Image (cartoon, rainbow, N blue to C red):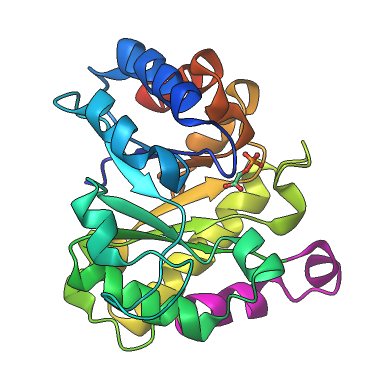
């Protein structure tokens, strides 16, 4: 019922030329994929990558945005601009944004509403830090982030919404959650969604796992029933490793 989604988050990597080359490589091997594939280059490369991806079935996404359509917000980019650049997805509330750029559940919620208004699919990131996990507060933290991000979002938006569980201690560390740890939180998130809306709406939401997903550990994570795909950072910067993760999802 849920078509799996693999998203590459290129973070603050690649010049325009590097991004074009990487996108061409990805298009070359993944244009016919049976799962949904999206890549999120840095802002400066969006237009160039949009051209490379045209007609391929691979989608374009951004890594962040402001919630207003336009205005005096120096350095920001709006949902209207992202849609205009060819984006279909936007990552919101990534832990690096929360940690280094003071992103809060409130601002993530503003952005979720703005994305939905502009037909952008938000990929809302949630996840606990190592200290929070060790204190036994994982569910409290993740539950709060889910409820905060989705405040006043109606259930008819469920199908156009993606969540990503990314334990902060697993991002860029090479340390990934075990499939059991990830599935436990994914099931919890889906239960939260069922409480916020209802079971049928919760069943429509894609919940991705992120945090050191590599070709070698993807299969076991993606086999879990509530893991509907992956948000991939480091391993999405090379055609071969990203393609292998997509292939693992295709055969999951
Ligand atoms: P990683 O990043 O795959 O490099 O751990 C994932 C993410 O931050 O989305």
Give the residue drawn at x 44%, y 67%. Answer: 76
Horizontal placement of 228 versus 10: left or right? left
Q: Is residue 225 magenta?
A: no
Q: Using the rendered image of the protein, determine whether residue 184 is visible from the camera's viewpoint.
A: yes
* Region in magenta: 129-148
The answer to whether 108 is drawn above or below residue 219 in the figure is below
Give the residue drawn at x 77%, y 54%. Answer: 169
List x then y, in percent, for residue 70.
28, 75
Image quarter for residue 196? bottom left
Horizontal placement of 83 versus 223: left or right? left
By secondary structure, the bulk of the magenta-drawn segment is best described as helix
Q: Is residue 136 magenta?
A: yes
List x then y, in percent, for residue 25.
40, 13
Give the residue drawn at x 60%, y 28%. Answer: 235
Q: Quadrant of the C terminus?
A: top left
Of residues 191 and 174, the one drawn nearer to the viewer in this rendering: 174
The quarter of the rendering in which ligand 1 is drawn is top right
The answer to whether 83 is drawn above or below residue 51 in the figure is below
List x then y, in percent, for residue 167.
67, 56
Q: Using the rendered image of the protein, determine whether residue 199 is visible from the camera's viewpoint.
A: no
List x then y, in percent, for residue 61.
35, 46
Horizontal placement of 70 versus 93: left or right? left
- Looking at the rendered structure, the number of numbered marks drawn on it comes to 0
Image quarter for residue 228? top left
Image quarter for residue 72? bottom left
Of residues 143 and 48, the one drawn nearer to the viewer in this rendering: 48
């Amino acid at each position: 019922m849920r078509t799996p989604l693999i998203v590459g988050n290129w973070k603050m990597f690649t010049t325009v030329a590097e991004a074009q080359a990487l996108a061409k490589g990805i298009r070359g091997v993944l244009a016919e994929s049976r799962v949904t594939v999206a890549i999120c280059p840095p802002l400066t490369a969006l237009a160039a990558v949009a051209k490379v991806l045209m007609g391929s079935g691979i989608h374009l996404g951004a890594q962040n945005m402001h919630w207003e359509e336009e205005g005096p917000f120096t350095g920001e980019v709006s949902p209207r601009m992202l849609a205009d650049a060819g984006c279909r997805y936007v990552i919101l509330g990534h832990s690096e944004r929360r940690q280094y750029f003071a992103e809060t559940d409130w601002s993530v919620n503003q952005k979720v509403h703005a994305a939905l208004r502009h037909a952008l699919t938000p990929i809302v990131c949630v996840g606990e830090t190592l200290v929070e996990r060790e204190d036994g507060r994982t569910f409290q933290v993740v539950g709060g982030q889910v409820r905060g991000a989705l405040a006043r979002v109606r259930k008819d938006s469920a199908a156009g919404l993606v969540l990503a569980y990314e334990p902060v201690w697993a991002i860029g560390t090479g340390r990934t959650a075990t499939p059991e740890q990830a599935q436990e939180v994914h099931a919890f998130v889906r239960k939260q969604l069922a409480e916020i809306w209802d079971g049928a709406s919760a069943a429509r939401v894609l919940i991705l796992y992120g945090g050191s997903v590599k070709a070698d550990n993807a299969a076991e994570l993606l086999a879990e029933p509530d893991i509907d795909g992956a948000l991939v950072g480091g391993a999405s910067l090379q055609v071969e490793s990203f393609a292998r993760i997509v292939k693992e999802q295709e055969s999951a």
